[in-house]
Each structure stands twice: as structure tokens, then as C-alpha cells.
Amino acid sequence: MEHLIGFYPMWYVPSVGSATVIAIIATIHVLASHTSVGASILLAYLATKAHRENQPQIYDYIKKYLLALLVFSYVSGSITGPGIWFSATVANPRGISALIHNFVWVWAAEWIWFVAEVTLVYILYYTLGRIDQKSWLRLAWTFAIGSWATMYIIVGILSFMLSPGHEKWFTTGNILDAFYNKNYFPHLFMRSAYMFAIAGTIGLVIASLMKKDISEKVYKDIVKTMSYWGIGGVILGSVFFGWYFSTLPERSIAMLTSIVPTWYYALIFALLLLVLAHFVLTAISPRFVKVHTAYPVYLLIFFLGIYPEEKIRETIRKPYIAGEFVWVNQVIAKDVPAKGIKSEVPTIQQAGFLAVNPFVPEGLKRITPENEIMAGKAIAILQCSGCHNVTGNSGLRPFAKKFEGMTDKNAVYNFLANYLTPENHPPYMPYFVGKDEELRALSAYVADLVSKGGRVSARIEVPAQNQARIDGR
Ligand code: HEC
């Protein structure tokens, strides 16, 4: 009892895992947010051009684009933004806690910028043509700055999740050391460049929908602007990607070359070429701008670009969820002297993984022959399910496949006892923490699972004998 650690209840999503739930919400959010941040700058630029060259029709286009942003990006973006943090909080409360303890004011600042951004998009839409152009332009640039500021801030938190970037933060605990970590700027610039390709693609869709309402000259002008910014975005984004890559921690590079499937890169590369080719064609001649080409390209960006990119970012962060000290399975595995945080590994090794978790039923905390398999299942869910489907044979890296053919618990034990150790564990996986009898229970569960064809119920039940012992019967 004296060794309880502040773990939270576990959110176990059978088959695909909670990580996939977050990934789906996050991908929608990235599409919406990058469209709107990119568009905010593109539109401010276009408005300046309209004002200078006295081309009022460009404002009609801007108004349509703003409406599209309001109806699509802002609705889906505002739902999925908090959705990411809600789902991430239930999936990984201690990871989010680590972030909050560093970045609470940074988050607050982001929220302020976001409120400014949302307020301004409404103001811009409803005041266009009703107030003088100069004032409207000033608002448009404020909107652009505010939108980009939200990205400026959130990228600091995202890159810290991958790595604090330098050892210094562990001893200073300084918020700026955490925020301006080694891959902050390449990450920020990479997103800032690619967002123009995303916003430019949807800009072409809107242009072609309005073709009949504006003069040919203005139409060509808009198409050229979208295409040039798009081309610049793809090329610069790829240059910044190279820079980003060079700032990744060693373990991430190891994972990029070992466990990220090659076809992910193939997809992303093919997509970049496609988006670039599309912009080059539309830059050469506006004839090539078609809703039924530009819109599919936009959707492909979602499926072939953003989704694999988000998955890769998740993968190369392993085995940590945040700051290179909290593992995906919630265990704090490294000291952070500046924050008074101590690794929990020694306590868990000594007291037992099941014993320290307040949400493990009493009847599973002491392992007996009757509860061994059930206790093993609890360990698998708590310690492995962040990255594996531990009760089914499909979905997220199912145990059934990783332990294929291993129906003997001693064989599983011998394998894990040599593999998931502090010395031998692979860079993408934490080593096992717990007592030896707990590793035996996990092995018994795995062998039982595999011998049952890889699928069992995800329920955790305390066997009657163990319950009786607790109740003192
Ligand atoms: C941080 C994520 C993560 C956690 C937590 C995790 N694993 Fe893994 N595991 C992986 C990845 C990634 C792979 C291999 C790549 C793939 O096939 O996708 C893997 C592969 C494996 C393999 C196959 C051997 C190999 O290295 O390819 C076994 C066995 C395995 N895991 C067991 C476990 C057990 C048991 C636990 C819990 C004690 C666990 N894993 C926890 C990420 C994780």
C-alpha cells in the first residue's frame, strides 16, 4: 500500500488502440488548421494586391474563401482541436500532465491568439466592403499574424513531445529551453511552408467555382497567385523537411529507417510530386484549374500526406509520449531534477507494477496460480496496449502476430526476459517494468492468448478464489 503511484484509469480501445482515435481526430485538425493558417496569409496578401492594383473583384473571391473557411475549417477545426486534447488526456493523462506542467501559460497564450483568430475571421467576413479598405487590410494582416501565432506556439509543444532537444532542460526546467528545442524552427518552417500548398489547393477549388463571376484577368491573377505560393510551399517545405530530419534525435532516425514502412515514404513522395505537378500545370495555364481535379488533390493531401505524416511523427516519438521522460505506457522513466521528478522504475521494480497502480483490483495485485493469466492480461493492457492490440489478432501491432506460434509460457518468458530489458530493448519499445513474477504472468497471458487464436475478451475479472481471499472469506 505504501507504494501507490498516481496512475489514472486506463482507456483501452480494442483493436485499433486509443492512438488511432487520436490520430484520426488530429489528421482532420491538421488539415483544417493548416488550410486556415495558410489561407490567412494568402488572403491578406491578395487583399493588399487588390487594394494596390484597385481590383475590387479580388475581394469577391476573398469573401468566398473566408466563407469556406468559416463553414468548413473553423467548424471542423474548433471541434477537433479540443478533441485532440480530450482524447489525448484520457488516452495518456500523465503525458498531458507533463505538458501542462511545462506549458500551461504557453497554452493559455495560444488560446488567446486562437480567440483573436476566430473573432477576426467573423469580423473580416462581415465587414468586407462595409468599412474602408485600409482598415480592413489592417484587420486582415492582424488575422494572418494571429493565425500564424497559434502555429508558432503549438509547434513548440509538439516538438517538445518528441524531444526536449537538449539535455539542458532536464536541469534548468526553463520553459524557453523546452519550447525552443532543437527541432523547433525546422518544424515550424516546414509546416509554415506546406500550409501554403494546402491553402493554395483549396484556393484553386474556390477560384474555379467562381470563374463565371469574375473577369478573366482577375481569375488568371488569382490562379497564378495560388499556384506560385503552392509551388513555393512544396519546394520550401521539402527543403525544411531535410533540415527537420537533421535535428531529429538518434532513436527517431533509427526508427525512421527500421520500423516505418517504406511505402509511407513512397506515398508522401508521390503526393508531393502530384501536388507540385498540379500547381505547375495551373501556373502554366488556368485551363488546368478544375474543381474535379483540385478537390481530389486536396483530399489526397489528407489521406496520403497528413495521415502518414502524423503516424510517422507518433512512431518516431516512441517509446516516450512526452519530453523523453514519460513512456507511452505512462511510466516516468527518467529523472527530471529541475522539476523534482524522479524515475518510477526503481519503485515499480521493487513493489510490483500491479501493486503500485491504484486502479488494479486488489484481487490481482498478488499473483497466484488462479489469477496469473488475468493479472497478465492487466499488465498487457496497462503496459503494452498503448502500442499493441493485446486482446485481438488485428489492428494495432497485434500481440497474436508479434508472438506468433508461442503457446508455451516458458518460451515467452525466456524470450521477454532477455529482450525487454534495460540493456537489450529496441529503441521503439520501453523495457518491461515489474517483478519477475509479473513478467511470468504476462508471459502466461500471452501464451494463453496465442493458444486461443489470438483473441480474448478485454474484460478484467478477479477470479472467485482471489476475491474471496480479499474479502476474508
Ligand atoms: C511505445 C510503444 C510500445 C510499447 C509500450 C510496447 N511496444 Fe512492443 N513493439 C512496438 C513497436 C513499434 C514494435 C515493432 C514494430 C512493428 O512491428 O510495428 C513492437 C514489437 C514488439 C514485439 C515483436 C518484436 C519486435 O521488436 O519487433 C514484441 C514481442 C513486443 N513488441 C512485445 C511488447 C510487450 C510485451 C510490451 C509490453 C510489456 C510492448 N511490446 C510494449 C512498440 C511498443
Image: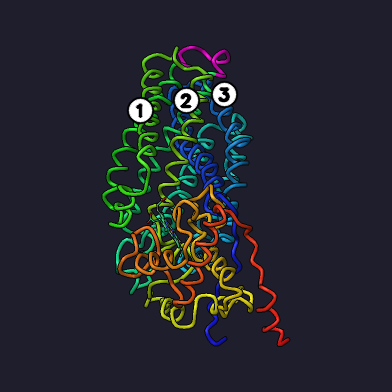
Residue 472 on image: x %, y %: 71, 87
Q: What residue type is labelled 1?
A: Leu
Q: Do the residues labelled 3 and 1 touch (CB within 8 Å)?
A: no
Distance in Å between CA atoms under marks 3 and 1 = 31 Å
Indicate which label's residue lies in the foreground, 2 or 3.
3
Q: Position of residue 277 (x, y in %)?
A: 37, 23
Which residue carries the number 3 mark? 60
The CA span between labels 2 and 3 is 10 Å
**Label 2's element?**
helix
> Of helix, strand and loop, which mostly describes the magenta segment?
helix
Residue 199 in view (yes/no): yes
Identify whether 462 is placed above or below 45. below
Boundaries of the magenta span: 209-219
Residue 130: numbered disc:
none
Q: Left or right? Give the position of 252 relative to 41.
A: left
Mark with earlier residue (1, 2):
2
Front residue of this view, candidates 158 and 138: 158
- Quadrant field for ligand 1: bottom left
* Nearer the observer, 106 or 454: 454
**Contact between labelled residues 3 and 2, with CB atoms less than 8 Å apart:** no
* Residue 261 lies in the magenta-colored region: no
Residue at disc 1, CB closer than 8 Å to ligand 1:
no
- Residue 273 got which mark? 1
Q: Position of residue 287 (x, y in %)?
A: 45, 12
Looking at the image, tell me whether mark 3 or mark 1 is earlier in sequence order. 3
Query: Who's the residue at 58% across and 15% down the image?
Result: 213
Read off the residue under disc 2: 50
